[in-house]
Image (tube, rainbow, N blue to C red):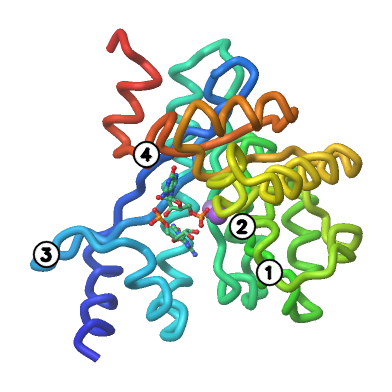
Amino acid sequence: LEMEADLRRAVLRHEFQLRFQPIVRLRTGEISGLEALVRWQHPERGMIPPLDFIPLAEETGMIVPIGEWVLREACRQAASWNAQRGDEQPLSVSVNLSAVQLDRADLPDVVRSALTESGLPPHCLVIELTESLIVDHRPETLRRLQAIKALGVRLAIDDFGTGYSSLAYLRRFPVDIIKIDKSFVDDVGDVPAAAALTHGIIQLGQALQLSTVAEGIEDAGQLSELADGNCELGQGYYFAEPLTSDAMHALLFPGD
Ligand code: G
Ligand code: G
Ligand code: MN
Ligand code: NA
């Protein structure tokens, strides 16, 4: 209960921050986008990771204003970096969405206004959904996702391969990107079954013309196995951990 009151105060006092983890083109090593990950800077308890407050935020509905702030701030920051990058390929920014946010009819309007306010081109925004959210979806969810897609925004399935899903939803849901769960990537270099599953997911993505992103790449062996297997993109500590916006800025603009 105390934490719930704290969380309400945190929304009013803007105690949230974003971290940005680069998403890298595995063939070339260039940064193609960023995943935005929220943190709570608690006045007494310090930095609180999302797994310690997102569940409560979802139960209490507070994820709605928090998620809206995340979306606006991620779009604003990406648009600002893209402006500074000038003629370079624009970066995309990926934002994690909770099922509770998708239960709200105004979500497509919230997304549209985050884009309009920031000036970020719609194709530069990626909304990440978990497999369980898609599998247990309510009837309205599909329509809302289609409305968001109609704006030009891209959709990604996070933690792919960990849910109970049948693959049938890949045909019904307007998905653009598959994010291969870290549990596959962990063992891709040394466990044949993990390598086979990972390559199977990559080929599935290719057959359906979806981009594939490998999550949680931590060493060069995993990277070469994935790159050789034609996985397009990846993220993980091998490249960079989630960075503060200052650290991300320094990475993007080393001369500044
Ligand atoms: O670094 P990491 O601890 O950032 O993130 C842990 C989990 O929290 C991830 O599964 C991620 O999807 C989730 N998460 C991070 N940021 C957000 C956010 O802004 N909204 C939601 N709903 N989940 C988030
Ligand atoms: O949204 P998602 O569940 O994909 O969030 C990614 C989570 O994985 C975040 O908590 C992020 O901090 C974490 N993460 C990103 N790269 C790595 C990595 O290389 N190793 C580990 N252990 N965690 C990572
Ligand atoms: Mn994610
Ligand atoms: Na994930």
Q: Is residue 62 above or below residue 233?
A: below
* SS assignment at label 2: strand
Q: Secondary structure at mark 4?
A: loop
Looking at the rendered image, the quarter that the N terminus falls into is bottom left
Residue at label 2?
Answer: 159
Distance Cα–Cα, label 1 vs label 3: 36 Å
Which of labels 3 and 2 is toward the front? 2
Q: Which callout, 2 or 4, points at the residue further toward the start of the chain? A: 2
Residue indicated by mark 1: 163
Q: Camera-side residue: 201 or 220?
A: 220
78 relative position to 120: left or right? left
**Where residue 179 appears, x then y in whole percent?**
65, 48
Residue named by callout 3: 43
Asked if the residues shown at circle 2 and circle 1 are in contact, with their CB atoms under 8 angstroms apart, the answer is: yes
Q: Which residue is mark 4?
A: 241
Residue 31 lies, in percent from the top left, at 53, 24
- Disc on the earlier residue, 3 or 4: 3
